[in-house]
Amino acid sequence: MDLFYSEEQISVSTTLFFSELKQNLLAAIRKTSPVRLRLYSAHDVTLMNFLIGFNLTNAELAYQKHII
């Protein structure tokens, strides 16, 4: 399996996204954000990283389904 699809690489690449998402959600809940609407756009690769980040699938399965 390629290094790009390793569990460690995906974990590192999703950490910043999850951190930003959490920060934005907390700001909205606390009503400290000046932003009234925030949209996130995603592709299949982005969604797979999200699912892997929440341990709903794993990198090996994602790699096999995406490549084959």
Image: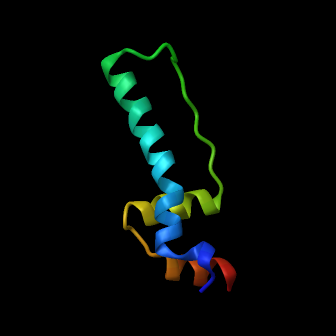
Q: Is residue 27 above or below residue 45?
A: above
Q: Position of residue 9 (x, y in %)?
A: 53, 68
Q: Position of residue 13 (x, y in %)?
A: 54, 58
Q: Is residue 52 above or below residue 67?
A: above
Q: How is the image coloured?
A: rainbow
Q: Position of residue 31 (x, y in %)?
A: 36, 15
Across the whole image, how many numbered discs are drawn on residues?
A: 0
Give residue 55's quadrant in the image: bottom left
Q: Is residue 55 above or below residue 66?
A: above
Name the image quarter holding the N terminus: bottom right
Name the image quarter holding the C terminus: bottom right
Residue visible at 46% across and 52% down? Answer: 15
| Residue situated furthest right in the rendering | 67
Q: Is residue 41 above or below residue 65?
A: above
Residue visible at 49% across and 60% down? Answer: 12
Residue visible at 68% across and 81% down? Answer: 67
Q: Position of residue 26 (x, y in %)?
A: 34, 29
